[in-house]
């Protein structure tokens, strides 16, 4: 047979945003020109780039590319086939340029989770009405090809549940608190010094960034419109080193875990601290690594693990999308036509689960019995309980309940004060069963 | 926008082989007709099936499908678009029917690792010359979409190393040996009774089945022709419970691990018992679950974990391929044109590694020094050593070496007898660094 040739016309990229990820993409295109054309059957080239500051010193040679100061101008250039949006932000330039690119007949590759979480439906409908595609592997879990796995590899499955640790900074903070025995505030400040936090740290530690990612995965998994506003968000700011230690004593780790599942009452989406078994893949995840767990009716449980951020991993995800487009692979944005996505009924706390409870109990006769009675009255049964020696007049008590509803837990918590034996604020954290 | 419709023509499947996987595919197509057409934009149907024994009682209603006794007849039916080959075996009917299907203009989906390991190049060239595609997600690591991840998701990466525990039976046997403290022969017999072993058990415990899978992954990862004959195969039959325990003492687990990497001397492919750190994802893998580790120059390390066999997971992988074809996704079999795949230089033991050595040392003065001298003469330096108390006249000694070449280990082993202090056969197992 004949020798390989890159016989197709070049695929021409216009890259908007030359931060870490943008430069990472430039490097891959430059370093692997031959490999990319062997794999896609055509040259993959960059024709133009755009960023706020042209004079900034960047770690790549950009002299062969046209420079645009306006990303909309870049997005609509005649010599650009694919608009690669790496600017970030869900309003303003990123959204405007993406719309302009689609209207000018370009395909779009983006790493912008906020854009998709807020405007995914509108953008998908626009792209599909114009016969264009929007790809966004880099928007969720960095280098892990989770969008492709969910949309294509597991397309024969009705998905049951999607879970993930998808904010490396939060997982770094929780791991570091545990390893160093340091409180949240100190480790938060450390992470800040190390440059691990977004300019608005609440995007990380408040769970917003990870919530964006979860809402995108949920749309694909369940064939529903992205509903970021329905994600129950709870950050890691209230996690104490005490809870990390106590949970460890009971065989659990605390993670900022995203969970999306279709329940009898509707679609439940949560991005909240959860306990997971210490011996599970999620429990063993340390530092900034991401993990996504996909559960389907046929495949069972698939676990994907990899770097959730950084130049190389995120650029790898962008290039996965670029090579797909170069090869002519085209899919609806969320795996089925945007017009066919359903508006999900939002369900809050619809799935039952065991809970971890930490109470500070006064040293009075019958104290434990009183607490058990409150739980029993709320319909909660106790699976395991551990009482610690008391230094003073009170002692911590840990309780792992059997499966129950969040409502019942809240009822019990509101009734604890009446017992006269519970001191301070009880802590209740959901245990996600894996 | 308009309501969703499955507007395309139906994709019609002909399924040859109605064992566990075939029936699993039938069930998914029947159960999820609506979901599949929403996701692919067209109905996915079965028109005809084929198996050896028509009278066999099967767990699915096949009454609506045409029956063919001859798989070639099935493969060439006018009302079949995709030939789904789930018969197995690399000679005879599976190969013949696959070729017939391609020549009749059908795409092929197969779960047949042996067929691809032995005839992948020939079949890929044939498919590509005819403008057809062969998909085989189910051939490697069951439900884990590793072929798609490697071929598409990581297409922007030069791959550095591909590793995997890809035979669930072997991992079950090794895990069970450790947990129950039972020797290999007993656990092998248990596995046999449980029906976990192939009719020819050497396919499992000899590493052949997993070697087939590794050779397929290597071809995609490195752009080389499948070279199964170059895979260094070593089964798990010689692993003793003693080594499992001793390795555990040193912080390792023993796995039948496949490793493919491009070295300065050529492509190294090994499917052999290895030690891996007990705390690594591979080390923590127990029972029949599979895991694949993909290392790329940009993405770093991606770890995929899931069920490696069984009706649901394998059928899920088949359906991933079917939905790809229904959506019009078409790629060269090994990710780039078959004619462009290079014949890899085969390298054996080309990558250096630390090794685990277990020696039985006679209780003589200076015995350890003599062993250390033999290692030093072979250019091997010792990282850690552990000597156990001796019950009789000899005692086990464990040595973890620094990185060295297999040649050097073999030289040392051949020189140990001359010391007069080493009893019996030393054990040397490679430690794969993760």
Image (tube, coloured by chain):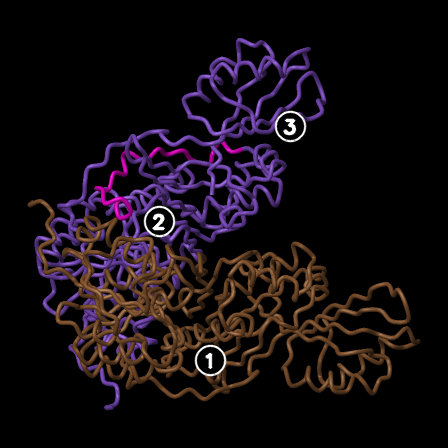
Chain colours: A purple, B brown
- Give the residue drawn at x 51%, y 33%: A239
Give the alpha-carbon distance from disc 2 to disc 3, as whole Å: 36 Å
Look at the numbered discs 2 and 1 and tell me whether their residues touch, using CB distance below 8 Å.
no
| x and y, in percent, of residue B328 in the image | 18, 65
Reply yes or no: does residue B216 show up in magenta: no
Q: Tell me if residue A343 can be seen.
A: yes
Relative depth, front residue between A321 and B12: B12
A275 left or right, relative to A58: right
Residue that badge 2 annotates: A296
Choose top left, top right, bottom left or bottom right for residue A20. bottom left
Q: Tell me if residue A138 can be seen.
A: no
| x and y, in percent, of residue B333 in the image | 29, 75
Residue that badge 1 annotates: B262
Question: Which SS class for mark 1?
Answer: strand
Can you tell which mark lies on residue A386?
3
**Residue pushed farthest left?**
B2
**Sooner in the amino-acid sequence: mark 2 or mark 3:** 2
Q: Is A109 drawn above or below residue B35 in the view shown? A: below
Q: Which residues are magenta?
A: A219-239
Choose top left, top right, bottom left or bottom right for residue B65. bottom left
| x and y, in percent, of residue B54 in the image | 29, 64
Can you tell which mark lies on residue B141?
none
Give the alpha-carbon distance from disc 2 to disc 1, as whole Å: 35 Å
Chain for disc number 2 = A
- Give the residue drawn at x 72%, y 77%: B381
B22 left or right, relative to B202: left
Chain for disc number 1 = B
- Give the residue drawn at x 81%, y 69%: B396
Question: Which SS class for mark 2?
Answer: strand
Choose top left, top right, bottom left or bottom right for residue A43. bottom left
Nearer mark to the viewer, of 3 and 1: 3
Q: Are marks 2 and 3 on the same chain?
A: yes
């Amino acid at each position: 047979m004949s020798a390989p040739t890159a016989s197709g016309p070049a695929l021409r990229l216009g890259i908007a945003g030359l931060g870490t990820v943008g430069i990472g993409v430039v490097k891959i295109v430059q370093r692997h020109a031959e490999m990319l054309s062997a794999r896609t059957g055509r040259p993959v080239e960059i024709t133009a780039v755009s960023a706020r500051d042209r004079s900034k010193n960047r770690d790549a040679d950009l002299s062969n590319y046209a420079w645009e100061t306006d990303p909309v101008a870049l997005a609509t250039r005649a010599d650009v086939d694919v608009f690669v949006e790496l600017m970030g932000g869900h309003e303003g330039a990123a959204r405007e340029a993406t719309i302009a690119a689609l209207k000018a007949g370009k395909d779009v590759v983006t790493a912008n989770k906020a854009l998709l979480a807020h405007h995914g439906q509108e953008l998908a409908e626009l792209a599909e009405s114009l016969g264009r595609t929007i790809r966004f592997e880099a928007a969720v879990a960095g280098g892990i090809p989770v969008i492709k796995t969910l949309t294509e590899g597991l397309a024969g499955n009705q998905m049951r549940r999607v879970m993930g640790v998808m904010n490396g900074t939060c997982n770094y903070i929780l791991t570091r608190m545990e390893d160093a025995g340091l409180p949240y505030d100190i480790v938060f400040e450390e992470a800040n010094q190390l440059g691990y936090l977004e300019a608005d740290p609440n995007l990380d530690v408040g769970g917003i960034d990870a919530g964006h990612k979860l809402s995108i995965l949920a749309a694909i998994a369940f064939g529903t419109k992205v509903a970021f506003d329905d994600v129950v968000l709870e950050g890691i700011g209230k996690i104490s080193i005490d809870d990390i230690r106590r949970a460890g004593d009971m065989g659990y780790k605390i993670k900022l875990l995203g969970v999306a599942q279709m329940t009898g009452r509707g679609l439940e989406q949560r991005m909240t601290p959860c306990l997971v078994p210490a011996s599970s893949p999620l429990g063993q995840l340390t530092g900034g690594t991401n993990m996504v767990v996909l559960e389907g009716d046929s495949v069972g449980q698939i676990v994907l693990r990899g770097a959730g951020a950084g130049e190389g991993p995120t650029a790898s995800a962008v290039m996965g999308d670029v090579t797909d487009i170069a090869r002519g692979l085209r899919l609806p944005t969320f795996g089925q036509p945007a017009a066919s996505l359903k508006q999900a009924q939002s369900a809050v706390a619809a799935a039952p689960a065991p809970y971890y409870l930490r109470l500070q109990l006064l040293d009075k006769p019958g104290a434990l019995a009183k607490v058990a009675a409150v739980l029993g009255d709320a319909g909660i049964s106790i699976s395991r309980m551990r009482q610690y020696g008391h230094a003073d007049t009170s002692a911590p008590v840990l309780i792992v309940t059997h499966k129950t509803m969040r409502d019942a837990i809240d009822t019990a918590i509101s009734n604890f004060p009446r017992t006269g034996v519970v001191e301070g604020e009880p802590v209740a954290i959901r245990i996600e069963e894996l």
